[in-house]
Structures are given as C-alpha cells and as structure tokens.
Amino acid sequence: MAIYAGTSGWAYAGWKPDFYPPKLPSKSFLSHYGTRLNTVEVNYSFRRLVAPSTFENWTAATPVEFKFAVKAHQKITHILRLKNAEEMVRAFMSSVGPLHQAGKLGPILFQLPPNLKCSLELLGEFLAQLPRTPRYTFEFRHESWFADPVYELLRKHNAALCVAESEDRTVPDETTADFAYYRFRQPEYSAEQQRELAQKLSAKIAEGKDVFAYFKHEETPQGALHAEELLKAVKAKAA
C-alpha cells in the first residue's frame, strides 16, 4: 500500500525560493514538483476539458509512479447535478484517457455543490453508470450526506468518501473504499497536527489502504512543504 501526498496545484511562482529554486522557469515547475511530491490534484479540469496534449506533456514531465487526481467537470456536478450526466461523463473520461493509459491517473474527485442535498437514488444511479476504473471519490458539502446509508452505497461501488477538512467543516473519517482520500484545507498545521496526520494516515496504510492526501494550494509554499513532510513521516513509520 502507498501514500500519495501533494497539493491542489503547482503553478505558483510564490513558492520560490522555499520550494522551487529561485531561477527555475515556470515551464519546469511540474518536473521539479515531481522530484519532491508524488501526486497533485488537478482543479483546472473543473472548468474545461483538458486537451490530450496537455495531459501527455504532464505525463512526460513526471516520474513513472506519479499520480494525477482530477476534479470532475462542473457540468457533471454543478450544472447537471449528477442527473442525466452520462454523455458528459463519457466526454470527461475520454479527456483523461492519456493519464489512464500512462498509469498516472489517480482518483476522480466529484465535488458536489453545497446546496445539493442527499439523495440515495440520485447517487446510486450515478455510481452505477461509472466505468469500473479508475477510482472515484465524492466530496459532499451538505450535512445530509453524512449518514450510514450513503457510506454503504459508496462501499458497494468501492468509491471513497472524500474527507475534506477546513475551518468550517469536518467530514467523518469513514473508510468506504480500498483507498482513502483527504483534502486538508486548514490555513496552517502545527508540528503537532502534522504528527497526528502522519499517525492517522499510517494507520490507514496499515489497514491495507492506499492514501491520497492534498494540502491547500496557496501563493505561499506551506502546503507543498507540509505534503513533503507528511510523505517523509509516513514512509519513515513504514520503514
């Protein structure tokens, strides 16, 4: 089992000089990022279908084991709101094909709008139409979704509950798939909090789960540095 830790983006000149070397050109950011972290969450795909050539370039710039988690297009989650979304799901899945073929596609993140309330029928129908691969994770942002029937439905389809932690919301840490997916969105994490996160994620790996963890992307490099420390701490515990 493996730990994948990174941020939700990498194209930030403000990460110099603490994460990126001072003279590193922006076109080389991703390749340098890939030498220090082993995954990134792509939010760019939320607003547009990414061109195959872009994914091919990203694949070429990163190590073999690197994974790209990709946020699903807003038409699926926010416009169609999971309903009658088959055509758009096919288009989206086709767009991420180059990552899938290269073995670098991590989980697909379906981030639902805050005003979309729980509907087991809606979620069940949507899950049933998804291809068996890749992996899928759902970030629910209305409290009504945090209930045992939802967790059981996710388990049936091996889809992960996205454990999104922010200043105003804490999602139950329910394991519903053969992997776990975390979005850490606090503005800062103390050394003690970082140790606690490393212990928690190490326990998930010990249970036989792959773990994907993403810190908030900001103009400052703190999230990237937190992710790097988390990788080192979890790997040290596994050694």
Image: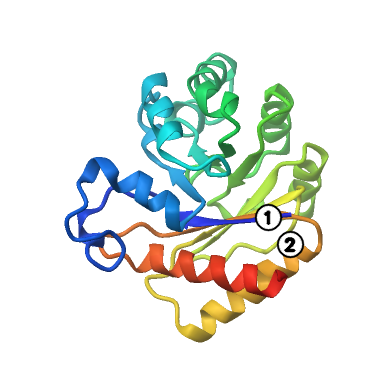
Image disc number at residue 205: 2
- As drawn, 174 above or below 93: below
In the figure, is residue 206 to the left or right of 45?
A: right
Circle 2/circle 1 CB separation < 8 Å: yes
Q: Position of residue 2 (x, y in %)?
A: 68, 55
The residue drawn where x is 57% and y is 35% is 105
Residue in front for this viewpoint, 5 or 119: 5
Q: Residues within 10 Å of mark 1 (few under 14, many from 20)?
A: some
In the figure, is residue 226 to the left or right of 147?
A: left
In the figure, is residue 13 to the left or right of 110?
A: left
Image disc number at residue 230: none
Q: Position of residue 17 (x, y in %)?
A: 22, 66
Q: Position of residue 112 (x, y in %)?
A: 52, 42
Q: Is residue 74 visible?
A: yes
Residue in front for this viewpoint, 74 or 196: 196
Q: Secondary structure at mark 2?
A: helix
- As drawn, 218 above or below 88: below
Q: Is residue 168 visible?
A: no
Amino acid identity at mark 1: Ala
Looking at the rendering, which quadrant does residue 167 occupy?
bottom left
Tell me the residue that label 1 is attached to.
2
